[in-house]
Amino acid sequence: MPDTILRVGFFLTYGHVSGRRTMAKSDKVAAVAELVERFRAADAVLLTEYRGLTVGQLKQLRRGLGENATYAVAKNTLARLAAKEVGLDFLAEDLKGPTAIAFVSGEPVEAAKTLRDFAKDNPALVLKSGAMDGAQLSAEAVKKLADLESREVLLAKAAGVLKAKIGQAAFAFNALPVKAVRTIDALREKQGEAA
């Protein structure tokens, strides 16, 4: 970029504008603190590359994620510092390039499904990696997470299996006294015939 007149306080100076935004140190500290809180509050964190997506597509993705996920773009250096502070150092390798972070509170399956489905329709969105319960998730693991059924569905299936097993147990317990009575009756008949 060409040299430009820059205003520094009351003074004007000539300088080179790189096009990069800079933040004051106090702003950086505040941003890292906010990211640390988001990392700590999240049940899962999913990283994506958003290069090539329009603002409209990003808005659509944010709406699709719903209320249990916040989709944010943060400076990679600040996100790396925050991730390191909360023990998610392994995310640093994917915090390069245009990265957006989905902070998920609650069930991560729905957010992973939304990101996977959006990426199918918009190839510019790339799933990078993530973290859940302090463990690293590869891009492949995030896709597998998206293939899972929701927690409610899994709980309903487990409840159905338990209900069926309880029904089978109740039937077996009811059959035991009847079987015992029949066995006793058969023994009595046998003793009566022998006598």
Image (cartoon, helix red, strand yellow):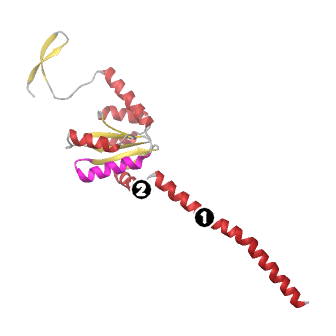
Residue 129, can we see it? yes
Residue 35 magenta: no
Residue 95, can we see it? no
Quarter of the rendering containing residue 43: top left
Q: Nearer the viewer, residue 67 or 41?
A: 67
Q: Label 1, on which residue?
A: 165
- C-alpha distance separating marks 1 and 2: 24 Å
Q: Secondary structure at mark 2?
A: loop
Q: Nearer the viewer, residue 9 or 68?
A: 68
- For the C terminus, which image quadrant? bottom right
Q: Which residues are magenta?
A: 107-125
Horizontal side of 181 relative to 83 (left or right) equals: right
Where is 125 relative to 29, above or below? below
Residue 99 got which mark? none
Q: Amino acid at mark 1?
A: Lys
Residue at figure coordinates x 30%, y 48% from the top left: 127
Residue 148 got which mark? 2
Residue at figure coordinates x 27%, y 48% from the top left: 126
Residue at figure coordinates x 43%, y 40% from the top left: 105
Q: Nearer the viewer, residue 182 or 4?
A: 182
